[in-house]
Image (cartoon, grey):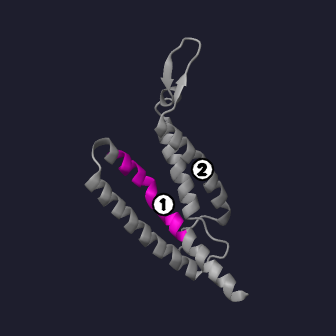
Amino acid sequence: MKKDFLFPYKWRMPGWILTVLFGAAGLAWSIDFRVYVQPDGIERYFSELLGGWIDEVIVVGLMAGLLLVAFSRERDEDEYTTRIRASSLVWAVLADSVFVVLATLFLYEFAYLYALFLQLFLLLVFYIVRFRTVLWRVRREAKGREA
């Protein structure tokens, strides 16, 4: 019995859209842009204007987008693509573990907390970058052999 836990291919593009939108929103939220309210001259922060729920929405949206991008089926999904997925996942876990160890050794206080928050998404980002890079190389080599 073969189990396949991949999303359909057509879900990758909505995943990229969610990743870009919520990634930009997360970046803007983390910078905490200052917004000046002109009529009464009160200075307010971006996060205060949106309320305390915006960070949860950004995390859920970014995680959903990254998961859709990372685990959407390829058009030509085969055993070799599955092998590339597995090796990319192992590589991403190792790279993410190295990041956590280095952050633990060299970062303190809030910088360490920010690094661990970043680590939530870094595993999927490492996986996506590694998988796409290896898949691109394999397809380029196959195209070169056909010519």
* Image disc number at residue 20: 2
Q: Amino acid at mark 1?
A: Leu
Instruction: Find the residue positioned furthest to the right.
Output: 147
Q: Is residue 90 left or right of residue 37?
A: left
**Percent from the top left, x then y, of residue 86?**
48, 75
Q: Amino acid at mark 2?
A: Val
Q: Is residue 128 magenta?
A: yes
Q: Is residue 133 magenta?
A: no
Q: Is residue 108 above or below residue 51?
A: below
Instruction: Residue at 28%, 53% (x, y): give it.
Output: 106
N-terminal label among 1 and 2: 2
- Check if mark 1's residue and mark 2's residue have beta carbons within 8 Å: no
Q: Can residue 2 be seen from the camera position used here? A: no
Q: Which of the 4 image quadrants contains residue 4?
A: bottom right
Instruction: Residue at 62%, 55% (x, y): give it.
Output: 16
Q: Can residue 94 be seen from the camera position used here? A: yes
Q: Which of the 4 image quadrants contains residue 70?
A: bottom right
Instruction: Residue at 32%, 54% (x, y): give it.
Output: 103
**Percent from the top left, x then y, of residue 48?**
48, 27
Instruction: Residue at 48%, 60% (x, y): give it.
Output: 124
Residue corresponding to mark 1: 124
Instruction: Find the residue positioned furthest to the top.
Output: 40
Q: Is residue 79 above or below residue 51?
A: below
Label 2 Cα crowd, 10 Å radius (few <14 / some 14-19 / many 20+): some
Q: Which residues are magenta?
A: 113-131
